[in-house]
Structures are given as C-alpha cells and as structure tokens.
Image (cartoon, helix red, strand yellow):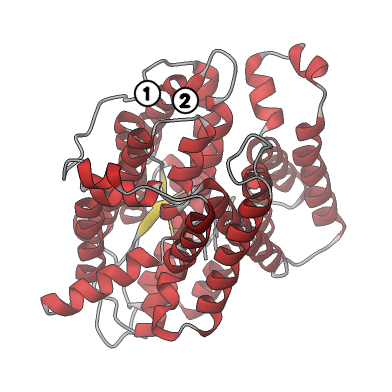
Amino acid sequence: MCSLRISHNLAEQAITERSASETIFEVGIDQPLPYGQLLILGLQNIFGMTGMFVFPGILGHSFDLAPQQIAYLYGMTFVVCGFVTILQSALLLRLPIVQGPYAGSFASLLAVGHLQGGGLGAAYGSFFVAALIWCALSIPIAGTSIIGLLSRFLRAPLIAGMIVIFIMIQVSNVALPGWIGLPQSPGFPLVNILAGALAVVVLVAVTLWGGRFRRAAVLIGLAAGSVGYSIFRPVSLAAVANAPIFVSPQVFPFGHAIQINLVIVFLLVLLPASIGSMALYQMVADWGGQTVPSSRMSQGVFAIGLGGVLAGLVGGFSTIVYPDNIGMLRTTRVASRYATLAAGILLIVLGACIKFDLLLVLVPLPVLSAAATLLFGIVLMHGVHILAKADWDERKYIVAGLSMLVALGGMFLSPEVLAQMPLLARLVITQPVISGGLTLVVLHALLCGTPPADAQV
C-alpha cells in the first residue's frame, strides 16, 4: 500500500512469466486511449500513491515549518513525482510506470536534517549532489551501467525483504509518537488519539470494503480524521482562501550546503529504490510482451536520478515505483503508458496549485501520523512476506540475524558513545537502512555466493 514496498517477490514472479510473445493486457503498452479514460486512470494512479499525502506533512511538522512551507513541500513532491512519471512513460523507459515519493529518501532527509550543524539546507544540498552522481552511474556504457551490474547482486528476496524492514524501522519514530503527540500539543492526548483512531478505522474500512473508492482510502481516512479533530480543535480555511493559485518553485528553498559524508549517505539510500524499481520495470515489460535490455533499464534508473536532482534543487523526495500502481495494471488489464503519462501531468498540475497544497497542510499531525502508523505497519509485514520467499539455510540466518541486530542496535547507542565517532560513522550506524543494509549486502555477497550468470540486469 505504500511507496516503501520494494517488491522483489514480484520480480521472482516475473522471471517465471517472462515471454516476449505473450501479454496479459487487453490494452497494450503503446496503445492510446480516449481523453476521458486517461483522466480517470490518471486520477486512480494518483490515489494509489499513499506516501504522497503523508511524507511532506510529517517532514514539515518535524522541522516546525510554516504552513506555507509545508504546502510548498507538498507541491514540489507532486511536481517531482509527475516529472519522473512523464519521463518513464513517454521519454526514457517508455513503460506504464508511476513513481511516487520514496520512504528511504523521506527517512534520510528527516534524520540528516536534524543533525547538529546540518539542517534541511545541508540535507537537500548533499542530496542534490548524490543524485547527480547517481545519474552518472546509471548512464549505459557498452550496453550496461554500474547500477545495472549492481542490480544482479541485490535482487535476492532476502535482501529485498530486509531492506523494506530496515526502512520501516527507521521511520517508526514518526508514527505512533506523532499520533499521540507531546504534552504541549493542542489535542494531547485524548483528541489526538481519538482523531487518529477515526482516521485509521475509516482507512481500514474503505480499503477492505470500499469497492471503487478503495484507491482513495488514504485521502478519505485523512479527511475523516481531520473532521473529527476539527470538532474539538477548529481548523481555519482562511489560509487556503487567501493563497495565490500557483506555487513558484524556488532553488534550494531551505538553504544550500554540501557535506561529503552526507552525499555518501544519500548515495547508499538511492540504491535500494533503484533496485526495487528495476525489478518492477522488468515485470511490467514481461506482462506487456516487451523486452527491456540493460540500456533501457538504465534509462529508467537515470530518470530516477534526474528526479532526485530536481527534488534536491527545489525540495521534495526521490522516487520509487509503487506496487499499488503496478497492481492496478494487472487488475484493469489496461497498460497504456498514455494513462500513466496523464497521471504525471495531473501530478504537476495539482502540485502547482498552492490552494490544493494548503488543503493537505490542514490535516493535523496526529491524523497524518496515525495513517502512517497503519501504512508503515502494512509495509513492514510486506517485507516479512518477501522474506518468506527466501530459501532459508544457516548462512541466510546469519546474514539476516546479524544485519537486523546491527540495524536495531545502532538506534540505542548512548549519546556519549556516538559523540566519540566521526560524523560519517555516526550517520551510518544510527540509520538502520544504511547500517543494516550495508551489513546485509556485504554478508550476503560473502556467504551466499554470486548471482547466476544469466541473471537479468
């Protein structure tokens, strides 16, 4: 249900279904559609991008940004995702792919931005440089790219599932704690808890029994929780009414600074998103009876890098393919990349409308955090499901167990111990997705062998 689902288990399914002469779709990848259908399918794709409606608000509130600044974050998140989706649909990858905000990017910006002497300026400036490097690494040379070669080693279900879990561990501190709030919070504790619970109940009900409204479950849940909250803590719409219509993009709106150690951190964060996305690119191509060589796959990763560059420049998040959107292709059997192109255009239009962005800002933090608690929990269990696909043996127990405790243990190191470490070491060890992910990848390469020679890159 969320961006964080790096569905490498779907990649395994794709391997068994690979046949360039067959397609499961009734409307092919390159087939155009009437404008009315494009609008409906485009909106459906947007409603499936759950992180879009949660990440900017939580990030903005965690830094005590003004409502206009949080609205700007929402707007640029929509614009960046729309930009990458257009690249994937029409210009580079040319597949029906929708890319939404990546939870690993959100978690890292959140953690790095709160470092002493850092702030959002250093976070976004370093992220911008890391994305530029990532673009260079994804350029195909002699038919492949460095990222393409790395993908051969990182598609195992063990790695995919553990990385999903690490990401969820890293963002868990903004879930339930934000739902309950602090003693100085306006609705602490009863209003916060009840409004968040209402949002969760409605979200679950619409998801399970909402029929055609299922894809809008997150928006409906957030709206219900916000209405419940406003009964006790009225919310003013004056800011929306007085706001201009369009947002003006700014270059480095939160300042700009570059720290090499932070650049390295963001490079490590970009890797899982690209690997997970490549697995889903291949699956969609197989479903549509198309061949995606390494050069074309690298173009898709290059688009992710370009999106990261834009996100670092104007504010936003790097992107990942959302499996919910991939699931919609299978459900509707409509694979037209013009539908996802329409989604990209709609994302840019909505993001550019500051009045729409401010409406999202009105959602109270406890309601946002309650929805995030549910969504993050679902994705955590999705990671467990991926791990069930692994062929477990003693070596994999060692790899998974050690990396898990390294990821968890870094979160509980005392401030005195962390103060004795260099900044880069402190960044790595306190971020589960990096400390656990590095341990996981290195141990897997050493103990579990190399990928087969015919692995799809």
Seen in the picture, residue 403 relative to 216 is either above or below; the reply is: above
Q: Quadrant of residue 318?
A: top left
Of all residues shown, which one is farthest toward the bottom? 26
Q: Are marks 2 and 1 in contact (CB under 8 Å)?
A: yes
Q: Secondary structure at mark 2?
A: helix
In the figure, is residue 124 to the left or right of 180? left
Give the image location of residue 219, x and y in percent: 42, 64
x 77%, y 32%: residue: 410
What distance separates the C-alpha of mark 2 from that of mark 1?
Answer: 9 Å
Of all residues shown, which one is farthest toward the right? 394
Seen from the viewer's position, the closer of residues 421 and 364 is 364
Seen in the picture, residue 401 relative to 322 is either above or below; the reply is: above
Seen from the viewer's position, the closer of residues 248 and 381 is 248
Count of labels in the image: 2
Give the image location of residue 382, x and y in percent: 64, 65
x 64%, y 43%: residue: 181
Give the image location of residue 56, x and y in percent: 43, 43
Q: Tell me the tag on residue 254.
A: 1
Instruction: Tell me which numbered mark, 2 or 1, is placed earlier along the sequence.
Output: 2
x 80%, y 64%: residue: 392
In the figure, is residue 140 to the left or right of 366? left
Q: Which residue type does callout 2 highlight? A: Ala
Mark 2, residues whose alpha carbon is within 10 Å: few (<14), some, or many (≥20)? many
Mark 1, residues whose alpha carbon is within 10 Å: few (<14), some, or many (≥20)? some
Asked whether the viewer can see residue 365, the reply is yes
Of all residues shown, which one is farthest toward the left? 35
x 19%, y 57%: residue: 345
In the figure, is residue 403 to the left or right of 256? right
Asked whether the viewer can see residue 291, the reply is no
The residue wearing badge 2 is 123
Q: Tell me the tag on residue 129.
A: none
